[in-house]
């Protein structure tokens, strides 16, 4: 039961913002951080040319390198992400944590 609640705690804000959130706010929705690596998902439209089913902005930061990308939530639930260096990532949504507004 605790696992289900943890998954819902992570997915609900992502689903809410991706499903019906305002595309004008450009706020970070969720992030995955491990060491120098940080992937951040946003609720704003993606500005780079990417597969048409990846609608929202994402960033990938590793050390001093930063890449822009696009993401969407798919069944599984997984987050599919395409970055402007032609990198593709498919990451379980449960690994992302909601970004707390300060």
Image: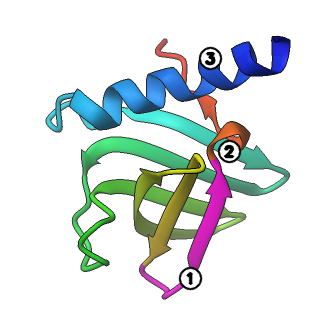
Q: Residue at x 46, y 31 (%)?
A: 14
Picture disc at residue 9: 3
The front one of 44 and 91 is: 91
Judge whether residue 91 is colored magenta. yes
Residues under numbered marks 3 and 2 in contact, where contact means CB atoms less than 8 Å apart: no
Tell me how far mark 3 sits from mark 2, CA to CA.
Answer: 15 Å
Does 99 sit above or below residue 23? Answer: above
Who comes first in sequence, dot 3 or dot 1?
3
Residue 38 is situated, as x and y percent measured from the top left of the image, at: 66, 52
Tell me how far mark 2 sits from mark 1, CA to CA.
Answer: 16 Å
Numbered-mark total: 3
Residue 24 is situated, as x and y percent measured from the top left of the image, at: 14, 35
Image depth: mark 3 or mark 2 in front:
3
Q: Quadrant of the N terminus?
A: top right
The residue segment tinted magenta is 84-92
Image depth: mark 3 or mark 1 in front:
3
Residue 79 is situated, as x and y percent measured from the top left of the image, at: 54, 54
Tell me how far mark 3 sits from mark 1, CA to CA.
Answer: 28 Å
- Quarter of the image where one finds residue 91: bottom right
Question: Crowdedness of circle 1 by 10 Å Cα count: few (<14), some, many (20+)?
Answer: few
Who comes first in sequence, dot 3 or dot 2?
3
Q: Is residue 71 left or right of residue 24?
A: right
Q: Residue at x 61, y 70 (%)?
A: 89
Provide the residue designation for mark 1: 87
Provide the residue designation for mark 2: 32
């Amino acid at each position: 039961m605790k696992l289900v609640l943890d998954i819902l705690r992570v997915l609900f804000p992502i689903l809410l913002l991706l499903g019906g959130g305002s595309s004008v706010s450009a706020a970070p929705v969720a992030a995955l951080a491990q060491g120098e690596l940080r992937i951040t998902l946003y609720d704003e439209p993606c500005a780079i040319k990417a597969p048409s089913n990846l609608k929202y902005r994402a960033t990938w930061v590793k050390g001093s390198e930063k890449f822009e990308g696009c993401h969407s939530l798919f069944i599984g639930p997984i987050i599919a992400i395409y970055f402007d260096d032609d990198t593709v990532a498919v990451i379980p949504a449960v690994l992302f944590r909601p970004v707390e507004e300060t």
